[in-house]
Image: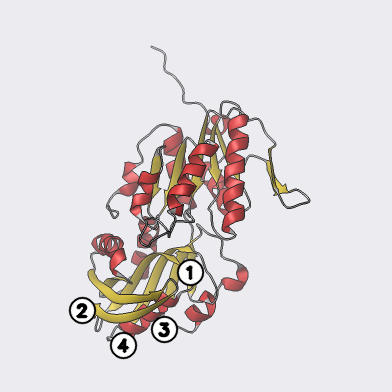
Amino acid sequence: MSTTRRPALASELSIVTGNANPALARAICRSLKVPLTESLVGRFSEGEIRVKIKENVRGKDVFVVQPTCPPTNDNLMELLIMIDALRRASARRITAVIPYYGYARQDRKDQPRVPITAKLVANLITTAGADRVLTMDLHAGQIQGFFDVPLDHLYAITVFEQYIRRKRLKSIVVVSPDVGGIKMARGYAKRLEAGLAIVDKRRRSPEATTVMHILGEVKGRTCLLVDDLIATGSSLVEAAEALQEAGATAVYACATHPVWSEPARSRIASSCLKELIVTDTIPLAPEARHPNITVLSVAPLLSEAIQRIHYEQSISVLFDGVPG
């Protein structure tokens, strides 16, 4: 009885990247043991984005690694144009690997005369020619429903959990910096077998908040703040100060996406946070680094998901015990 051999991964799978996070794309390639597909993603003299895929991708399963992080507009346009180029090059399937999904903050019409940009961007990606999407820690879970193509939503909780367990922290309480993050915090608390607390706050503006009070017991405990992203750092720093005032012995924080708007670095550097742990879904510039900031790689998690998608295997095992 003859058996069918599985074809070599490199012969059918192609990884393409733009300028948003090439280091992450190279790390994924190293993990998968496949070469990075050579491409040109540059600019014409007037500033328009120029793309050319320099290798044959006809009939291949192509994964485009491109977070839509700042500069958001440039990186989003690079993604759309790369997808279009691959579609016209007769790629068999195109998966947009978007570790950080930008334009996600406006995910509902919560005020008069505002757009739902998260849905608009989903439409653009689908129209460009993406057959499926792979992303991580969306700002709002409902964004999954904005896509008319299959979407796989990964969580960085497994990456953070391994690192936190190695630190052997005592008496951990997982803290949500706001009411909207309760579901994520509950998932961390369950995985770490820790307590749960919430920082009740009111938002003065899109960038400024006021901490009200702490729901849960944090006195004499090690607090772990968890969030999906950190922009200016104001919410995280204010929450950390409120926890310290409430008697926490130490405050750590985990944030998947270091969006890192000014003056995030100076706020983190002067805060009471003992350590801020982020991932490399967004590249952290050298000038943004600080001794109390730790960057963990999501490349192994993404490469495992890519391999499973390529071989049409279930990736539900990667969701074991995560929020939702």
Check whether the beta carbons of the residues at disc 2 and disc 4 lie within 8 A of each other: no
Against 235, is 105 above or below?
above
Spatial separation of the CA atoms under disc 4 and disc 1: 23 Å
User: Where is mark 1, residue-wise?
Assistant: 231
Instruction: Using a 10 Å C-alpha cutoff, classify the residue at mark 3 as few (fewer than 14 neighbours), some (14 to 19) or many (20 or more).
Output: some
Residue placed under numbered mark 4 in the picture: 245
From the viewer's perspective, is residue 32 above or below residue 155?
above
Report how far apart the C-alphas of labels 2 and 1 lie in the structure. 27 Å
Q: Quadrant of residue 88?
A: top right
Label 1 or label 3, whichever lies nearer to me, is 1
Q: Amino acid at mark 3?
A: Cys
Residue that carries the numbered disc 3 in the rendered image = 272
Amino acid bearing label 1: Ala
Give 80 or 269, whichever is nearer the viewer. Answer: 80
- Where does residue 20 sit, x and y in percent of width and height? 59, 54
Name which of mark 2 and mark 3 comes first in the sequence: 2
Whether residue 6 is visible: yes
